[in-house]
Image (cartoon, rainbow, N blue to C red):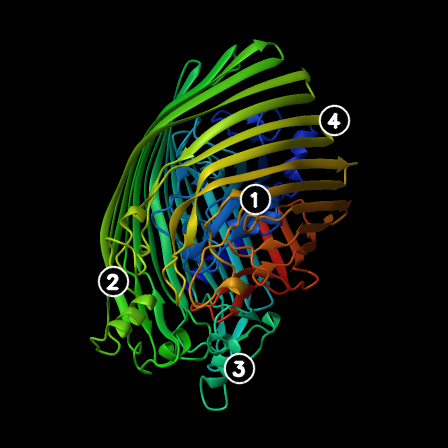
Amino acid sequence: MRRIVLLATLASAMPAAAHAESAADDAERQVAGQPIIVTARRRAEDVQAVPAALTVVGAATLTATYTVNTSQLSQLVPTLNYSSPNPRNTAFTIRGLGSSVVAISQANDGLEPGVGFYVDQVYHARPATAAFDQVDLAQVEVLRGPQGTLFGKNTTAGAITIATRAPDFRFGAQGEVSVGQQGFLQAKAAVTGPVIADRLAVRLSGALTRRDGVVRNVTTGRWLNDVHNDSLRGQLLFTPGPDFSLRLIADWTSFRNTCCTQVPVRVAPTLKPLAQQYAALSAGARAGGYAPPSMNPYDRLTDIDADAGVDTNEGGVSAIAEYTAGAATITSVSAWRFWNWDAANDRDYTGLPIQLIQHIPSRQDQVSQELRIASNHPAAIEYVAGLYWFHQKIVGHPISVYGPLATYWLLPAGRPADLLDGYQTDGTTEFRTDSHAVFGEVTWHLASRLALTGGLRYTYEEKVGSYDVRAFGGLVTTTASLLADKASILRGQSYTGTVADGSASGRVNLAWRPNDDLMIYVSHARGQKSGGINMSGLPVWPAGVPGHASGDPILSTVTVGPEHNSTWEGGVKVTALGGALILAVNGYYTRVRDFQANVVDNAAVIALRSHLANIPLVTVKGAEFDATARIGSRLFLRASGAFADGHYASYPAGPCPIELTGASTTRCDLTGKGLPGLPRWSGSLGGEYAVPTSVGTVFVRGDASARTAIHGDATDSAYTAIPGYALVNAAVGLRHGQGWEVALFARNLFNRHYLQNVTVQAGNSGLILGTPGDPRMIGLTLRASR
């Protein structure tokens, strides 16, 4: 409560200022001949001069659209797709490539993401950290395609780079308070100024978000899936002279929500005997049968009988030192970060005591060091070169406990009713990574308007993983068939794995500028993601395989091979009408060999489990555009769109969709099927119309995002498909010249029903669960700055 009062007081009591920042300011600089500056190539450049596909979202647009996290960012960047059944299972992809997590429990600590996530030049290794709210944002750049020849960690699909506002030697302060329906409260504040004139500056910022739950548990009366997020950031900027600066950053973010439950969506038929399908199981689960409170996900009702909650936080410290030595700038980025995770889940998502406890308390620590040298003035030859080192350690404790109805729901009839009652696992997993790299990129201006760029990177990585989990409890028995039944649900395993490999990646780019307002470019990039280690358990040998006992782990699956990405791209960037129209259009084709993903455990015949493996070939092709326009002095528009066609070009032994799952699991040929989570068409459109008046500027703003249907899981099941949808957000307000702004806003203005993600219930009864998107919210915002 004290934090709420403090931030609210800072925001509401902010002194008057010269002017309040508007969303149109992001384009104002370009239209007025002041280009949007990006650092995609680790030097400051006009975004229209960078021969690469990227989307830039400036501070004012982020503020006006209430964007504080990656989920909200995906509504502004169509090529970025985001899914998060809960924070640990967060996945974000660019062009359909990246993390393959699309459902609860598919996260695997031994799989590194294909999309890099950076905040203030520091790589965040765990995708879960992208679920946190960010504070004091200055700019976000979303880079598409393989990255690594310019900075940081090598990634095969792209990178999200977030920059926060730095300390200033002039006093300044900003504050914002928003209140709305569903008990919504968001407060943000920042203050900056000199400690020692021209030598030492400080910046302190914080944010909190509160919102009531949007799913009601009819059994307990509690509202679930609420929001309770906090973020704090402190910075110092030391500049002893004109050629050197040192920026120190400390940050902490917390996510403590009563979430993340899903609600029933539909029931899929399976090939199991009728007695093991949902209709029969629910009818016999208890006297009079069982029925969920609703099969309409937009009723937002559940009756789960186990605890639900998430308690996770992350933070760290970093130091960014820059020294200018003539025509070159030397940069050092040093960082230590941590991530803590714990959650309670009801993994059967019903009011039946099938699974009582499911969580994986985890702790991750990482240390990184990057050293770069880059040219800082236009020249015939421009360059970036650097060294990178990264280390991380993740320790987890997988815990599952089954209840009195587990035997009935998960196993065929004829087993003792208490066989699985109290059956559980406990143990420890540990995963370590050490990554070393050298990288560089050179741009040679062959002529005044023709430039050739080439970049190379060599990365050597060592990964070590250990998995030690024991299964115990339930009915004590020595009967082999009953022991096999128990092992089909949970099994103890102990193994270690090691990966050590080196790889080269690179890219080449040719850019031609026929005139100052037009650039045409073509490029080819090759990237590699190193091999991984299965950290969620191994598939086992079925009965009848010579040399192996039934249930023995398949040790050849301890590790997964590296992933290889090749991308061809061409694009055009245009500045027209004196800067009133800015347009970037590109097309691409990507082939990924040995795509890393979760595939089915072919011997887990009762409750499907996944493990890491390589898909032989994946292809994605598409086209994208980004545009901004100013019509007159009052109307600003932005638009982005993407077409994508992604498929498994070769996937002969993939997981089967729920409707083809029988009493014994079989593999299915998914060759030619579409990639999960990738809409064929997606777009984002926004704009602001502002009219000066005697009391200030009255503005009206609208933002819309839309996408076509997606496959909700890796099998392309018809029953896990997520329909397309469009969302509209809007605001109307008054922006005063003395630095304050008041606005009435609406998110999901038309109260559109949509699903964020879907999950197949464990045990494959046929029940499909999903997370409904947030309902309409109307609220009021007060902003002030000095």
Residue occupying the far bottom of the picture:
287
Q: Give how far apart the Cα atoms at labels 3 and 1 are.
A: 38 Å
Task: Provide the residue designation for mark 1.
Answer: 647
Residue type beneath disc 2:
Gly
Q: Which of the two marks, 3 or 1, is nearer to us in this view?
A: 1
Q: Which of the two marks, 2 or 3, is nearer to us in this view?
A: 2
Q: Give how far apart the Cα atoms at labels 2 and 4 are.
A: 64 Å
Residue type beneath disc 1:
His
Circle 4 — which element? strand
Q: Earlier in the sequence, mark 4 or mark 1?
A: 4
Q: Residues within 10 Å of mark 1 (few under 14, many from 20)?
A: many
Residue type beneath disc 3:
Ala
Q: Residues within 10 Å of mark 2 (few under 14, many from 20)?
A: some
Q: Are marks 3 and 1 in contact (CB under 8 Å)?
A: no
Give the left or right position of residue 95, taking residue 25 as reference.
left
Give the left or right position of residue 680, taking residue 471 as reference.
right
Q: Give how far apart the Cα atoms at labels 2 and 3 are.
A: 34 Å
Give the left or right position of residue 149, taking residue 755 as reference.
left
Residue for point 38% across, 49% down? 612
Task: Provide the residue designation for mark 2.
Answer: 492
Q: Earlier in the sequence, mark 3 or mark 4?
A: 3
Circle 1 — which element? strand
Task: Provide the residue designation for mark 3.
Answer: 291
